[in-house]
Amino acid sequence: MKKNFTLLIAITTIAFRSHAQGTWTQKSDVGGTARLAGVGFSIGGKGYIGTGDSHGYGRKKDFWEYDPSTNAWTQKADFGGKERYMAVGFSIGSKGYIGTGLDGFGFYKNDFWEFDPVTNSWTQKADVGGSVRDLAVGFSIDSKGYIGTGNVGGTYFNDFWEYTPDTNFVQNNALNFDGANDFVSAKLPMNVVDNFTLETWIYPTLLSGIQVPLSYGFDNGFYGDGVSITLDGNGLQILFSGITFFSTGYTFPSVKQWYHIAFVRNNGKMHAYVNGNLAPNTANITPYIPTSFRIGSQNAIRFFHGKVDEVHIWNIARTQAEIQADMIGSINGNQNGLVAYFPFNQGIAGGDNSGVTRLDDITANNNDGTLNNFALTGVGSNWVEGVSNRGCSSPTNLSAKNITSTSAKLKWDSVPGGKAYKILYQVLNSGAWTQTRTSTNSKTITGLSEGTRYR
Ligand SMILES: [Ca+2]
Ligand SMILES: [Ca+2]
Ligand SMILES: [Ca+2]
């Protein structure tokens, strides 16, 4: 159990215990100017102090990190909110938090900010519950934070609030298609008929009739082209050129679960993979050159009932190992051969999404799709929760240790039963992600540049 009290409380405790046993050793002065009523907490092996009031200089928002191994203070990114004093702070896992207080204009505050030492950046979180206030106290227990008591202009409080951090690092949505007329149209991202890969996650809510969650080609039921990922009852079919249904030999065991589907055409042979496993039958049919592209249906026919997420279109034949590796997490959009990538991470899951009718393609080709006939409210025909975890748990308590000028060791809590972890990082806000993998709960990242912020 870890508790992090505010600096104010720490001072009170120190004075009270000054008659007790133990040894005090003076260390380097806190960075910045002298001050009172700031906040402090620890994350990993480092201490942090920031905000406060500096007599004659006013309210502060500078923020400092103390490394006991070097006995040195390093200035970090300024606190994200307005300068203030009599705020409260604590840490949860690998993140620090500061909120409430009294700013330089005499306004009491209830805004609340998260500090990430890995990226050296602040992100605003939900306001602290109850009234604005100063002189509150805070602490954390395991994965929750607590703030209570305080004052506004002589009115004292004893209300008490628990903070639960976000558990979803990245919003991860999908689209739910109503099976009646919902579809997404997009520009055809390529027109190759050999050595290509179509990948998607699907969550069928019906296994009856013919449904097409992904159509790489035109097909109106009379004539067509290209290749479609097709469900016929509970069977997975490859539909060639709108004419030829080819059974992969795979049977879906049930509705309402996520399946990863990959169709690969490699030197004239077409294979299907479900959840990374090769389906029994291989086709050697050559499709007609595709002329259009849709998600959730073909041209006004074969509407899919259920959710679709993570559509990846490649102009290369991917290997089974590559397919298995990328099933467990998002990819970055910059991979060789990736001509369209729709992560579906838009809208508010199950919320009012009227107007959110563009499906983002995050590759450089930028062939964004257009949503057609969606209700965009409720859960039946809207943006909904996606296949974010791929059936996996997200690790917690991520921290960075052993930081040198070119490397850092990332560490996190083991996920019970976890076999592998995928790590994505980037120069802060640079757009390009680098990915790596490990089978243990730590990984040393190398090749970093000094003085550069990463996340
Ligand atoms: Ca998604
Ligand atoms: Ca785009
Ligand atoms: Ca509809």
Image (cartoon, grey):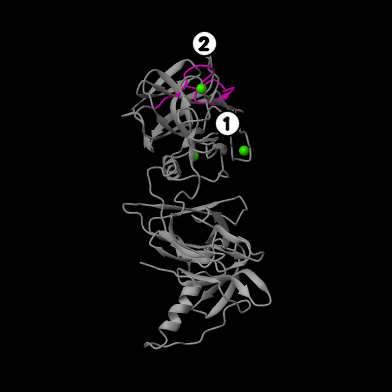
Q: Residue furthest right?
A: 56
Q: Residue furthest front?
A: 154
- Give the magenta part as a residue range: 282-304
Q: Would you call the spot at circle 1 few (<14 residues within 10 Å), some (14-19), or many (20 or more)?
A: few
Q: Position of residue 362 (x, y in %)?
A: 59, 40
Q: Would you call the spot at circle 2 few (<14 residues within 10 Å), some (14-19), or many (20 or more)?
A: few
Label number found at residue 215 = none
Amino acid at the residue labelled 1: Ser
Q: Quadrant of the C terminus?
A: bottom right
Secondary structure at numbered mark 2: loop
Nearest the eye: 54 or 381: 54
Residue 315 image-quadrant placement: top right
Amino acid at the residue labelled 2: Phe
Nearest the eye: 100 or 371: 100
Q: State which tag comes first along the sequence, 1 or 2.
A: 2
Q: Position of residue 402 (x, y in %)?
A: 48, 70
Report the residue at 59% width, 50% height from top.
432
Asked if residue 129 lies in the magenta stretch, the reply is no
Query: Left or right: where does residue 64 sit relative to residue 147?
Result: right
**Residue 313 sits above or below residue 422 on the image:** above
Q: Which residue is mark 1?
A: 354
Q: Position of residue 199 (x, y in %)?
A: 47, 34
- Asked whether mark 2 lies closer than 8 Å to ligand 3, one says no
Q: Which residue is mark 2?
A: 222
Query: Left or right: where does residue 120 sit relative to residue 251?
Result: right
| Mark in front: 1 vs 2 | 1
Report the residue at 60% width, 57% height from top.
427
